[in-house]
Every structure is written in structure tokens, then in C-alpha cells.
């Protein structure tokens, strides 16, 4: 499995973005973290920078939702690993994640959840 | 429950479904606050909007924080999480103190409250939908402050509202909050049908 070097955190609320960034800085200081406050901004970053290994993607956002952005990221092969981050645990959301080959972690984000996720992606 | 026309068994089922759903919400709230928080449902009322005042006498004059979230799907309407400003501030402090520099607390308070509302309502409503094997879309939450009557003033006096008292308890005490669910005219029927299906799957009908 490829090591995670650059991650994009997408959430319209600043708080979960800040918490996620802090966790990465403490547990994975070698990983570069970029933030986007909307799906449109995330898409623009993914297209312009093109070197993200992982996107942590909120679902419920104004404008384009995370569920709408994910298929575009897959179709255009912009970010290889997608992980939805949401408190919405409905079965159809988890089924969509499975269909897209995406992971799913429940809000709130925590150190334990992020560490588990990265270790699983990196095959540790 | 009068407005929803639920019989005793359906009413008990609703209370149980909300208790389970709030259990999920309590778990995420505990994770956010870094302390164990229990959410219990002592009462569920199905009332007209104008009757809410009589239920919230205890907090009628308090300034409350309300996070509104619109829903579409097997029921369409609006869910609102309401707790006192005092309790919301202690929650925000608990959530933010280990996460962000102290000087940023005031600046982040509003976003923290929105995230609390988002996470609590989303986890509660999505668990409720999962238990009933139904689908529900949730919109972006909005946060407002005022008295209970002020934050619940949208809509008409005769709207049917499921009004749930929620006891937030933690190791140092507790607080009563509320969740209200207003739904459109067709949704009441859908909720009752979904509860009956749940009872059938459980072998109780």
C-alpha cells in the first residue's frame, strides 16, 4: 500500500477541519494537510494540485455534497483514497461508500479513528 | 400521542426508538466532550406548536441555543435540538479546551455549537431512520438563540410537533434539553406506517 503523504480535509465547519489537522500534526507530522470548506473548493484543489493521496470528506455541506463530489473524484481519478466523515450513519450512505470503494468514519473525528484509518490504508 | 394518532403500543415503540437513537447521539456527544454524557427520554409529546410553552415552563425564560435541521424523506419537516445557553457553553468549553488554543474559544463557539447540533441530530435521525428501515436526507443545520418560544416561532400555531424532553446527564450534574420534530401533513401517516412495519418485524403485530 502507498504511504499517505498529502491529505485533503473537506468540511464546511472549521472545527472538524482544525481537529483533524491537529491530529495529523501530532500523529503523522510528515503528512501535508490541506483544507477545503466546500466540495467545489475541494474539487478545484484536487484538479489543480493532483497529488493528494487521501481525502477526508464531510457529506452534508452547502452546495455540492460529499456524496456528489466523491463519484467525480473517482471518475477523474483525482484522489485514490476517499474517506467519508459523517454522523449520518444511515445504511444507504454506507452502501454508497462501499460502492465507491471509499472508507467511512463516524463523526466526531478522533485520534484513534484517524490512526486506525491511516494504518489500514497503509497496510500496517 | 394525540397529533400522530398513535396507539399505546406504537407510542411505546416511538419512545424506545428515540431512546436507542439518542443513545447513539449520546455516544458521539460523549466523544466530543471527552466525558460520559447520557441522553434519556423521559417524555415524548405530540402537540400543536402553540402548546409547547406549557411543556417548557422550567426553561421558558432562559436563553436557549437551538440548532435547526431540515429533513426530507419518509418524513419531511424540521428537527430542532434545544438546550440552555449555559449548558451549551459548558459543552463548547469541554469540546474545545483540548482541541484549540484558549484565545480561539470565543471565535469558534458558534461553529462548535453548530457541529454539536449537526452531530447529535444527524446521528439521532439517521439511527431512527435505520431502525425503521427508511431513508432520510438532512440539510445544513442553522443555529439560533432566544427563548424557547422565540426559537420555535417559525410555522403556525396548529402545526403538529413531536416534542421530546431530553435529559442530558453527566458526572457533574445534568440539564434538560429538548428535541422538536415538525413534519408536513403527509409525514405523520408515513411515520405511523413505518412504526407498524417495525412492530411487525419485531413480531409484535
Image (tube, coloured by chain):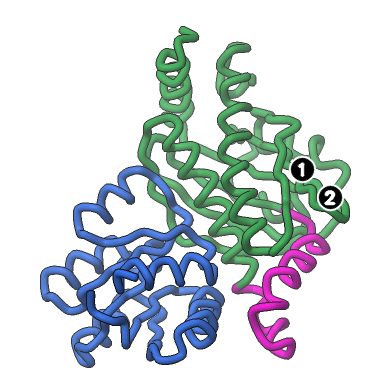
B119 over A42 or under it: above or below: above
**Disc assigned to residue B143:** none
- The residue at 19%/53% (across/down) is A99
Residue beneath the point at 76% across and 58% down: B64
Q: Is residue B157 left or right of residue A76?
A: right
**Marked residue chain, label 1:** B
**Residue B101: x %, y % from top left:** 68, 88
Quarter of the image for residue A4 reads: bottom left
Residue A118: image location, x then y, percent = 38, 72
Q: Which segment did they paint magenta?
A: B83-111
| In front of the other: A98 or B154 | A98
Q: Position of residue A68 (x, y in %)?
A: 25, 63
Protein chain holding label 2? B
Q: Nearer the viewer, residue B15 or B137?
A: B15
State which chain is coloured blue.
A
* Quadrant of the rendered image containing residue A12: bottom left
Q: Main secondary structure of the magenta part?
A: helix
Residue identified by numbered label 1: B167
The colour of chain B is green
B11 displayed left or right of A59: right
- The residue shown at (78%, 40%) is B53
Position of the N terminus of chain B by quadrant: top right
Residue at 41% x, 80% y: name it. A37
Contact, mark 1 vs mark 2 (Cβ under 8 Å): yes
Q: Which residue is mark 2?
A: B174
Q: What separation in Å lies between label 1 and label 2 (alpha carbons)?
A: 7 Å
Residue B138: where, in percent of width, then height? 43, 52
Same chain shared by disc 1 and disc 2: yes
Amino acid at each position: 500500500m502507498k504511504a499517505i503523504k498529502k491529505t485533503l480535509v473537506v468540511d464546511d465547519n472549521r472545527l472538524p477541519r482544525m481537529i483533524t489537522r491537529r491530529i495529523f500534526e501530532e500523529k503523522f507530522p510528515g503528512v501535508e494537510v490541506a483544507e477545503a470548506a466546500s466540495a467545489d473548493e475541494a474539487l478545484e484543489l484536487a484538479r489543480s494540485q493532483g497529488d493528494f493521496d487521501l481525502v477526508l470528506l464531510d457529506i452534508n455541506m452547502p452546495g455540492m455534497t460529499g456524496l456528489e463530489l466523491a463519484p467525480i473524484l473517482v471518475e477523474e481519478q483525482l484522489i485514490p483514497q476517499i474517506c467519508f466523515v459523517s454522523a449520518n450513519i444511515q445504511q444507504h450512505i454506507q452502501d454508497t461508500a462501499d460502492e465507491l470503494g471509499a472508507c467511512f468514519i463516524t463523526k466526531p473525528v478522533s485520534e484513534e479513528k484517524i490512526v486506525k484509518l491511516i494504518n489500514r490504508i497503509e497496510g500496517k | 400521542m394525540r397529533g400522530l394518532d398513535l396507539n399505546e403500543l406504537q407510542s411505546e415503540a416511538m419512545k424506545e426508538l428515540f431512546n436507542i437513537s439518542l443513545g447513539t447521539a449520546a455516544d458521539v456527544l460523549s466523544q466530543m466532550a471527552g466525558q460520559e454524557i447520557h441522553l434519556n427520554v423521559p417524555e415524548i409529546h405530540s402537540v400543536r406548536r402553540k402548546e409547547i410553552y406549557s411543556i417548557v415552563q422550567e426553561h421558558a425564560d432562559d436563553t436557549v441555543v437551538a440548532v435547526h435541521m431540515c429533513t426530507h424523506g419518509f418524513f419531511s419537516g424540521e428537527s430542532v435540538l434545544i438546550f440552555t445557553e449555559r449548558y451549551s457553553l459548558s459543552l463548547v468549553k469541554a469540546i474545545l479546551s483540548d482541541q484549540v488554543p484558549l484565545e480561539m474559544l470565543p471565535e469558534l463557539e458558534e461553529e462548535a455549537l453548530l457541529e454539536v447540533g449537526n452531530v447529535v441530530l444527524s446521528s439521532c435521525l439517521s439511527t431512527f431512520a435505520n431502525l425503521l428501515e427508511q431513508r432520510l436526507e438532512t440539510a445544513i443545520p442553522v443555529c439560533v438563540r432566544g427563548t424557547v418560544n422565540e426559537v420555535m416561532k417559525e410555522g403556525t400555531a396548529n402545526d403538529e410537533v413531536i416534542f421530546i424532553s431530553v435529559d442530558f446527564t453527566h458526572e457533574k450534574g445534568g440539564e434538560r434539553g429538548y428535541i422538536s420534530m415538525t413534519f408536513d401533513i403527509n409525514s405523520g401517516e408515513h411515520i405511523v406506517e413505518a412504526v407498524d412495519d417495525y412492530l411487525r418485524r419485531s413480531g409484535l403485530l
